[in-house]
Image (spheres, grey):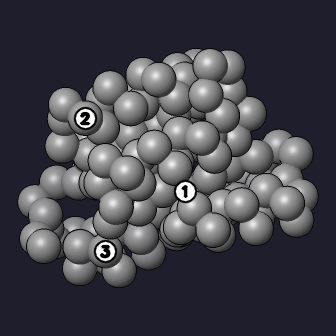
């Protein structure tokens, strides 16, 4: 599958975090979408072109893990990266079983997040920064 401009869905109940991440990836040429909770993320995934989903684990309505499982039912190959301020072995194992691309601890260094997002886009779509 080939991409011109990938779309990244940033799902977190912290609007400041979403906006920071949006700025990082839009400055690198990616299109970004935002969701404040898992239900909103599912609506976006079901109605728009999304190429990667960032999910906070601890959100109201649906957790990141619940959202991840439902996203995979809609689009099995869509890479999802989970983020958690309270990361433990159980979350990591549940994420692995739900086929998360990666799990990162918050606070996450923006360089580390960028690296993992670009790896997911490359592995899933053969997309490289600087060339679509």
Residue 126 appears in the picture as rendered? yes
Q: At 67% from the left edge and 19% from the top edge, which residue is drawn?
A: 60
Q: Badge 3 local density, few (<14 within 10 Å), some, or many (20+)? A: some
How far apart marks 2 and 1 lie (CA) works out to 18 Å
User: Which badge, 2 or 1, comes first in the chain's sequence?
Assistant: 2
Q: Which of label 2 and label 1 is nearer to you?
A: 2
* Left or right, 99 with reference to 50: right
Which quadrant holds the N terminus?
A: bottom left
Q: At 52% from the left edge and 20% from the top edge, which residue is drawn?
A: 36
Instruction: Give the x, y percent position of residue 17.
Output: 62, 30
Q: At 31% from the left edge and 47% from the top edge, which residue is drawn?
A: 74
Label 1 residue SS: strand
Instruction: Give the x, y percent position of residue 121.
Output: 34, 68
How far apart marks 1 and 3 lie (CA) works out to 13 Å
Which quadrant holds the C terminus?
A: bottom left
Quarter of the image holding residue 15? top right
Residue assigned mark 1: 81
Residue assigned mark 3: 124
Foreground residue, 12 or 41? Answer: 41
Q: At 71% from the left edge and 61% from the top edge, which residue is drawn?
A: 94
């Amino acid at each position: 599958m080939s991409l011109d401009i990938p779309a990244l869905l940033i799902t977190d109940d912290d609007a400041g975090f979403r906006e920071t991440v949006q700025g990082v990836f839009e400055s690198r040429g990616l299109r970004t979408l935002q969701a404040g909770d898992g239900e909103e993320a599912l609506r976006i995934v079901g109605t728009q072109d999304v190429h990667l989903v960032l999910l906070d684990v601890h959100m109201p309505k649906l957790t990141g893990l619940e959202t991840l499982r439902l996203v995979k039912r809609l689009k099995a190959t869509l890479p999802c990266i989970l983020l958690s301020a309270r990361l433990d072995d159980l979350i990591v194992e549940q994420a692995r079983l739900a086929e998360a691309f990666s799990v990162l601890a918050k606070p996450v260094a923006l360089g580390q997040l960028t690296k993992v997002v670009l790896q997911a886009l490359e592995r899933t779509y053969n997309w490289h920064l600087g060339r679509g």
